[in-house]
């Protein structure tokens, strides 16, 4: 008679393989190819004059020309520097403020009405004021970008922190965990997905604010070059500048998403 308690060796199920990276790239690559094909077809159809709608070939030719004469490198470096510094400042202050207001109801009641008042005011509306206060130098541009990023990041982080169950924090406090451990081991991991979403959204807002800042007065930069090319109706160069702006946004978002998958590995990015 066999022993009912006897069991065979426990077999650990094989790990489920993650999605193939190439398979994940197929949908966006297919969309990009379709968009390029539609663009080329519309540009070559004659429905719109090539002077107003250059095709992909003419746009890439203009982009290659800007790269060859050094204009692209100069403008890209200037824009990335402004956007990066403004993003870093705005994200740092917005994250800190979001954690504070999300965790402290009394502070939230005092600060939220002011932030809610400022959020509908776009950065471009503040360009004349920033120019009057700080001139047309780099400080005004970085502060405008930081302002826009701060408000965007604050909203996401505040909401994420406010959604952390109070019972988790009370349990940690009842176990004797000091404030810094409750923050590092309970509050921060729980709010990390919201923080990641805030940074990704803040990066896109930084590029939007960058355009407003450079149109307010600059001597280089991607948006500045768009304005100059627009004055001389160099539409092919304008399309090239827009293409670069879009690619920068995509690459930054992909980098932040990859970082999120490594750091916030317990939550899908």
Image (cartoon, helix red, strand yellow):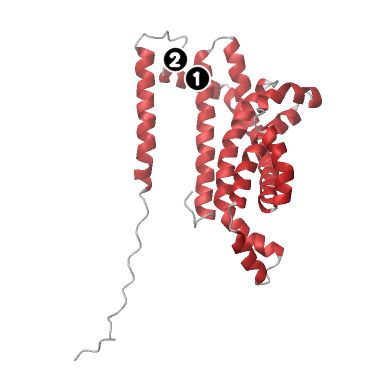
Snapshot quadrant of residue 214? top right
Q: How far across and how far down the image is residue 210, in percent?
A: 63, 29
The residue shown at (75%, 31%) is: 139
Specify the label residue 45 is tagged with. none
- Find numbered disc 2 in the image and state the secondary structure of the residue it sits on: loop
Q: How far across and how far down the image is residue 78, in percent?
A: 65, 29
Looking at the picture, tell me which residue is in the foreground, 262 or 66. Answer: 262
Per the image, the residue denoted by label 2 is: 54
Whether pointer 2 and pointer 1 mark residues with C-beta atoms closer than 8 Å, the reply is: yes
Task: Quote the CA–CA distance across marks 2 and 1.
Answer: 8 Å
Per the image, the residue denoted by label 1 is: 239
Q: Is residue 42 visible?
A: yes
Q: How many marks?
A: 2
Snapshot quadrant of residue 206? top right
Q: How far across and how far down the image is residue 83, in percent?
A: 64, 34
Judge whether 165 appears above or below 61 on screen: below
Looking at the picture, tell me which residue is in the foreground, 193 or 19. Answer: 193
Of the numbered discs 2 and 1, the one sitting upstream in the chain is 2
Using a 10 Å C-alpha cutoff, classify the residue at mark 2 as few (fewer than 14 neighbours), some (14 to 19) or many (20 or more): many
Judge whether 181 appears above or below 108 on screen: below
The residue shown at (79%, 22%) is: 132
Using a 10 Å C-alpha cutoff, classify the residue at mark 1 as few (fewer than 14 neighbours), some (14 to 19) or many (20 or more): many
Q: Is residue 74 visible?
A: no
């Amino acid at each position: 008679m066999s022993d009912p308690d006897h069991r065979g060796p426990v077999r650990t199920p094989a790990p489920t393989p993650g999605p193939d990276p190439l398979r994940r790239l197929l949908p966006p690559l297919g969309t990009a190819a379709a968009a390029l094909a539609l663009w080329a077809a519309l540009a070559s159809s004659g429905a719109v004059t090539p002077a107003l709608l250059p095709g992909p070939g003419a746009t890439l030719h203009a982009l290659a020309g800007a790269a060859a004469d050094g204009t692209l490198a100069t403008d890209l470096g200037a824009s990335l520097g402004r956007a990066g510094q403004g993003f870093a400042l705005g994200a740092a202050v917005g994250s800190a403020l979001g954690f504070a207001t999300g965790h402290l109801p009394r502070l939230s009641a005092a600060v939220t009405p002011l932030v809610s008042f400022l959020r509908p005011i776009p950065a471009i509306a503040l360009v004349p004021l920033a120019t009057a206060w700080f001139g047309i130098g780099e400080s005004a541009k970085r502060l405008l970008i930081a302002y826009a990023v701060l408000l965007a990041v604050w909203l996401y982080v505040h909401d994420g922190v406010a959604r952390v169950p109070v019972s988790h924090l009370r349990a940690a406090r009842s176990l004797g965990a000091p404030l810094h451990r409750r923050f590092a081991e309970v509050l921060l991991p729980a709010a990390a997905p919201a923080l990641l979403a805030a940074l990704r959204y803040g990066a896109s807002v930084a590029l939007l604010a960058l355009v407003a800042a450079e149109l307010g007065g600059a001597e280089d930069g991607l948006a500045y070059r768009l304005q100059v090319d627009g004055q001389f109706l160099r539409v092919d160069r304008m399309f090239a500048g827009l293409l670069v702006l879009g690619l920068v946004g995509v690459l930054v978002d992909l980098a932040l998403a990859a970082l999120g998958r490594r750091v916030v590995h317990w939550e899908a990015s």
